């Protein structure tokens, strides 16, 4: 089962995606997602120039060995570009192994640990009334968990809220748009929104909120305390996570559970957070954290510290990443929740897949491999469009975290 070809495909069916397709001499193919929102071409070049030439002639069955070869072999370890490239290779090789075995990938990971993968949707609106409508929309679709993002009075735009609610896409311009942020306005407004949502929907709906890295530890502690009466499933990315020790302070002050990890690339980014049980959910993804092989290592490490998974599943991860995530989600013992932002019709058409949503759960494909592919002819009709993520400034003009 030798690798004969590896193609890097960049396409923009409503947003940019980078996909790696590996072909073997016995005619099997596998796909991996390599999308890094706003920095797509850096990963495409890394794959094309530095990884694909190393793959040709290698045994596609040796997933762990190829992972180690690419990780240790680069000498310059870690980082989102390197790890997304390694992830794409790893994911494609698991796809090939599943096809060779005639089994869905989750069977190779130990088989099912649950019947379905509980997902959360996004209720985004400027006003509280808008949010109540959006939450009702998701509960009507069968969702048991909803992330709530609200506009903040006095701020022109806020993370997570857009006109196109179902298909929110933050990378909205060739050069970054600029948002204005005020922590005091935000901290004053958010608890009242959750009070209204709880009053309206009762105690059982699982509610989540993404702070998107904007607070300091003591501000996050205040937010966590003020949200305690509304029993959130998690408060996400309360502070930037470069300083893992910073989470101790939040933890000392609040019982609101904490989820972190969408910008993490390796187990080293979350080791202390997990060791010291400073978080409750680890949100790393297949694509940005080194593929199925490395993400499973992170989840296994988390499992022995009572930390559950909560994988990132925004629309800037392609259906290839989602397909792979679901095989992990359904098999690991410590699954928590899976984010599920729906892709647009154009994206779904370029990435035909057989995972499906029913009654609040996503179900992984039962086909051999991952159960997802890329239609390369259709992909070619959607050429790359430069698009970057916004930046954030405080009201006095200081650059802040977006
Ligand atoms: O590209 C950035 C997005 O993936 C991110 O803003 C989405 O925070 C996010 C989430 O939780 O979905
Ligand atoms: Mg997030």
Image: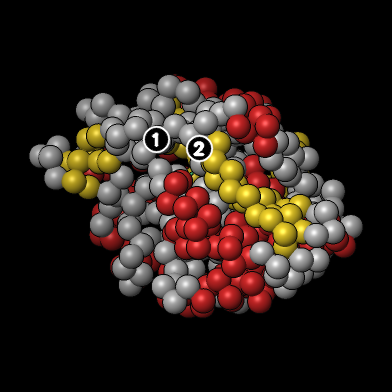
Location of mark 2 (residue): 16
Which numbered disc, 2 or 1, marks the residue that appears first in the sequence? 2
Decide if residue 312 is on the left or right side of residue 162. Answer: right
Which residue does the image show at 37% across and 25% down from the upper left?
A: 126
Q: Is residue 104 visible?
A: no
Q: How many numbered marks have been drawn onto this rendered protein structure?
A: 2
The numbered mark at residue 238 is none
Decide if residue 108 is on the left or right side of residue 91. Answer: right
Residue 24 against residue 13 in the figure, above or below: below
Location of mark 1 (residue): 387
Q: Is residue 80 visible?
A: yes
What is the CA distance from the residue labelled 2 to the residue labelled 1?
A: 8 Å
Residue 99: where, in percent of width, then height? 83, 56
Q: Secondary structure at mark 2?
A: loop
Q: Quadrant of residue 329?
A: bottom right
Q: Residue furthest left?
A: 396
Q: Quadrant of residue 352?
A: top right
Q: Circle 1: is it few (<14), some (14-19), or many (20+) Cα within 10 Å? A: some
Q: Secondary structure at mark 1?
A: loop
Residue 213 against residue 348 in the figure, above or below: below
Residue 231: where, in percent of width, then height? 49, 49
Q: Residue furthest right?
A: 102
Which residue does the image show at 54% across and 41% down from the upper left?
A: 10
Disc 2, disc 1: CB below 8 Å? yes
Looking at this view, is 294 or 357 the one in front?
294
- Quadrant showing the C terminus: top left
- Quadrant showing the N terminus: bottom right
């Amino acid at each position: 089962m030798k690798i004969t070809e590896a193609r890097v495909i960049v396409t923009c069916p409503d947003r940019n995606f980078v996909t790696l397709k590996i072909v073997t001499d016995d005619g099997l193919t596998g796909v991996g997602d390599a999308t890094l929102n706003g920095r797509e071409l850096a990963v495409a070049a890394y794959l094309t120039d530095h990884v694909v030439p190393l793959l040709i002639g290698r045994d596609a069955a040796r997933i762990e060995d190829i992972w180690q070869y690419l990780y240790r072999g680069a000498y310059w370890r870690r980082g989102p570009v390197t790890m997304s490239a390694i992830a794409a290779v790893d994911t494609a090789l698991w796809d090939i192994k599943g096809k060779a075995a005639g089994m869905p990938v989750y069977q190779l990971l130990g088989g099912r640990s649950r019947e379905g993968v509980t997902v959360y949707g996004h209720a985004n609106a400027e006003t509280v009334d808008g949010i109540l409508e959006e939450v009702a929309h998701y509960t009507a679709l069968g969702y048991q968990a909803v992330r709530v993002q609200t506009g903040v009075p006095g701020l022109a735009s806020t993370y997570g809220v857009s006109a196109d609610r179902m298909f929110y896409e933050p990378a909205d311009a060739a050069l970054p748009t600029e948002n204005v942020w005020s922590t005091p306005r935000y901290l004053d407004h958010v608890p009242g929104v959750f009070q209204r949502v709880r009053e309206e929907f009762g105690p059982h709906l699982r509610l989540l909120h993404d702070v998107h890295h904007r607070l300091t530890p003591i501000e996050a502690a205040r937010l966590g305390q003020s949200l305690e009466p509304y029993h959130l499933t998690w408060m996400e990315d309360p502070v930037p996570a470069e300083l893992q020790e910073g989470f101790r302070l939040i933890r000392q002050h609040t019982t609101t559970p904490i989820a972190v990890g969408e910008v993490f690339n390796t187990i080293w980014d979350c080791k202390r957070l997990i060791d010291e049980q400073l978080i409750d959910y680890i949100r790393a993804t297949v694509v940005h954290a080194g593929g199925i092989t490395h993400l499973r290592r992170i989840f296994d490490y988390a499992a022995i510290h009572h930390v559950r998974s909560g994988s990132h599943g925004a629309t800037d991860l392609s259906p290839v990443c989602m397909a792979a995530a679901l095989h992990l989600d359904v098999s690991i013992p410590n699954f928590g929740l899976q984010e599920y932002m729906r892709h647009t019709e154009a994206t779904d058409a370029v990435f035909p897949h057989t995972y499906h949503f029913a009654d609040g759960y996503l179900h992984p494909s039962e086909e051999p491999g991952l159960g997802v592919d890329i239609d390369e002819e259709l992909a070619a009709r959607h050429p790359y469009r430069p698009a970057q993520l916004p930046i954030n400034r405080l009201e006095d003009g200081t650059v802040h975290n977006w």
